[in-house]
Amino acid sequence: MSDNFDMCREELKERLRGISRFSDPMPEHLTRAMTEALDEASAPGSAPDKEASPFKRWIGAVVPVALAASLALGIILGRGGIRPVGETGAEVPKTVADYIHDVTHDHYLFARLDNALEVRQQDPAQLEAWLRQSLHFSPDLPDGSGPFTLEGGRIWHTVNRLSALAAYRLPDGRMAILFAVPAENLAPRGTHAESVAGHEVFAGRGWGREARAWYEDGLALALVVPEGHLPPSWSQVFLH
């Protein structure tokens, strides 16, 4: 039994040693606490009785290992390795460049799905209400004027956060997709930007698609179309 705990101790040391931010010496009191816990658990007097039930023997083996793991987790938390959600905000930090990379790929995936829309709805007010019911947010959707014909929407997931998706049909039959995610912790950097209709608009390409992204009312929005198929009037329709 003691051999198992020795292996456990060494494995924990190696894992922490392999993470650069934890390579500095462990505080003495934490080292002592972990060592004492493992030594106590592996002491001869603490070994499970040979006559004990298999369940009790299993508990005797697992509890010390769990204790060591919890101590290691405490060290990581103490050094800031895992941040509580409230410290950095509810969303994982990303950039608008990450966003464009993801939504161009998402458009590529969407085009390969059968029945990709969760709801078919041509009324923007009704689609906004449907999105808010699940996500508690929605972009301000245009009514499908000009070359954009609203077809419907769905709940999506991009840049590690839930996303609203609204799909529009273009005159040539291709699909334009408007994505919207919470703008929290989504930094406006990493790609080219220009001023369009009073908005800072970021542009990017990927997966045979092109995207325009901007910020509005606490959301980051991105319009994605097949490359070379962005109607010139897009800004008049989508930028408010």
Image: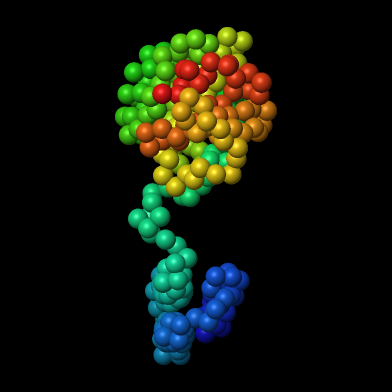
Residue sitting farthest toward the bottom: 44
Spot occupied by residue 148 in the image (x, y as percentages of width and height) = 51, 13
Q: In the image, 109: left or right of 75?
A: right
Q: Residue at x 68, y 28 (%)?
A: 208
| Image height of 109 relative to 64, above or below | above
Q: How is the image coloured?
A: rainbow
Q: Residue placed at 31% from the left, 29% from the top? A: 133
The residue positioned 49% from the left and 81% from the top of the image is: 26
The foreground one among 13 and 195 is 195
Q: How many marks?
A: 0
Q: Is residue 227 above or below residue 57?
A: above
Q: Residue at x 53, y 82 (%)?
A: 25
Q: Is residue 101 visible?
A: no
Q: Is residue 98 above or below residue 113?
A: below
Residue 6 found in image quarter: bottom right
Q: Position of residue 223 (x, y in %)?
A: 53, 26
Q: Quadrant of residue 79?
A: bottom left
Q: Is residue 13 visible?
A: yes
Q: Position of residue 211 (x, y in %)?
A: 58, 29
Rendering coords of residue 240 (x, y %): 41, 23
- Residue closest to the eye, 26 or 193: 193
